[in-house]
């Protein structure tokens, strides 16, 4: 049994000693694998280089964007370069509007010009949102001033002719009185007359009403009237009311 084992060992040695070298084909495959690994290394280096270049490009674009892009985080009208001219614009528009409108294409155009003129690089939609809020607050203040004059105990606005009344209640907003301002004056006076808010028409008890809400409804009713002669008729009616009022 031991002899057979020995023979087996000898046979194995003979087999390996007589074997041929690895075929060139196998060597070729091993060589190809080596070249393939070398290519992987080169591809990895190239990928890292591309990623680094992309990172640097992204950082450069980010810097340029921060320098050139408008501010989109927010905008405050107060103490900005556009505040003073914006207030003047709102004062000019108030006597013919009383209430802000949305959308207001004229306001948008005005703001666009003011931004360009003053070199403000904020994002336009952001600025417009801030401007609309600012304008709404300003109009509330303007209406409060106007109401104070209409209901004044010192002034008897009911006896004033329409042009005089317009100059009186809108004096802080404009020096000129045009047809559009006269129309708004007619709306205001007719409302005060019908609600008995004029000095000689007031009762001893104060009138309970939401002044501006009801006046806005009054204005909308007049605005919706499609009669082409409505303003002539309304003006004639208020002039007759003034005559009667003076006789009270």
Image (cartoon, rainbow, N blue to C red):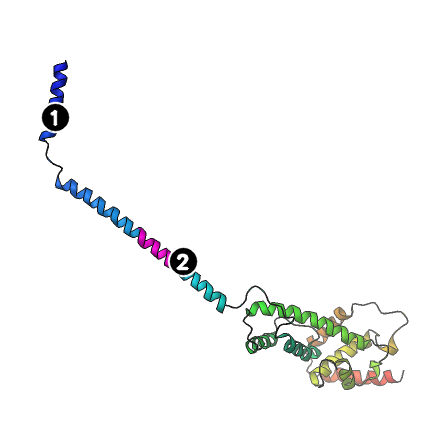
| Residue 53 located within the stretch drawn in magenta | yes
- Which residue is painted at 64% across and 78% down in the image? 85
Magenta-drawn stretch, dominant element (helix, strand or loop) = helix
The residue sitting at the top extreme is 1
- Which residue is painted at 13% across and 25% down in the image? 12
In this rendering, the answer to whether 48 lies above or below 24 is below
The answer to the question of whether label 2 and label 1 lie on touching residues, with beta carbons closer than 8 A, is no
Q: For residue 168, which quarter of the picture?
A: bottom right
- Which residue is painted at 70% across and 85% down in the image? 179
Packing grade of label 1 (10 A; few <14, some 14-19, many >=20) is few
Res. 214 in view: yes
In this rendering, the answer to whether 142 lies above or below 20 is below
- Which residue is painted at 12% across and 29% down in the image? 16
Quarter of the figure that contains the C terminus: bottom right
Q: Name the spot of residue 77 as percent of width and height, x first.
A: 63, 70
Q: Name the residue under label 1.
A: 13
In the displayed structure, does residue 75 sit left or right of residue 241? left
Q: Name the spot of residue 212 as percent of width and height, x first.
A: 75, 70
Secondary structure of residue under mark 2: helix
Secondary structure of residue under mark 1: helix
Res. 225 in view: no
Numbered label attached to residue 55? 2
For the residue pair 79 and 182, the one nearer the viewer reads as 79
**Earlier-in-chain disc, 2 versus 1:** 1
Q: Name the spot of residue 136 as percent of width and height, x first.
A: 68, 70
**Which region shows up in magenta?**
44-54
Q: For residue 105, which quarter of the picture?
A: bottom right
For the residue pair 165 and 118, the one nearer the viewer reads as 118
Q: For residue 237, which quarter of the picture?
A: bottom right
Q: Name the spot of residue 71 as percent of width and height, x first.
A: 54, 67
């Amino acid at each position: 049994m031991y002899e057979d084992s020995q023979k087996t060992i000898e046979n194995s040695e003979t087999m390996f000693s007589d074997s041929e070298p690895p075929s060139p084909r196998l060597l070729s495959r091993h060589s190809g694998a080596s070249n393939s690994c070398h290519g992987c290394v080169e591809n990895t280096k190239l990928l890292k280089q591309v990623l680094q270049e992309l990172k640097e490009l992204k950082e450069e674009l980010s810097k340029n964007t921060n320098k050139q892009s408008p501010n989109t985080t927010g905008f405050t009208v107060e103490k900005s370069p556009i505040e003073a001219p914006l207030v003047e614009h709102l004062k000019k528009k108030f006597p013919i509007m009383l209430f802000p409108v949305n959308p207001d294409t004229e306001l948008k155009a005005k703001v666009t010009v003011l931004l360009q003129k003053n070199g403000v690089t904020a994002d336009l939609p952001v600025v417009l949102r801030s401007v609309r809020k600012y304008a709404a607050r300003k109009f509330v203040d303007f209406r409060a001033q106007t109401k104070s004059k209409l209901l004044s105990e010192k002034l008897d606005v009911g006896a004033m002719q329409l042009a005089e009344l317009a100059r009186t209640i809108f004096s802080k907003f404009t020096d000129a009185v045009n047809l559009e301002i006269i129309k708004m004056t007619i709306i205001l006076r007719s409302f005060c007359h019908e609600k008995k808010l004029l000095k000689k028409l007031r009762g001893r008890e104060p009138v309970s009403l939401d002044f501006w809400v009801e006046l806005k409804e009054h204005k909308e009713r007049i605005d919706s009237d499609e009669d082409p002669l409505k303003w002539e008729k309304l003006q004639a009616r208020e002039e007759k009311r003034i005559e009667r009022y003076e006789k009270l």
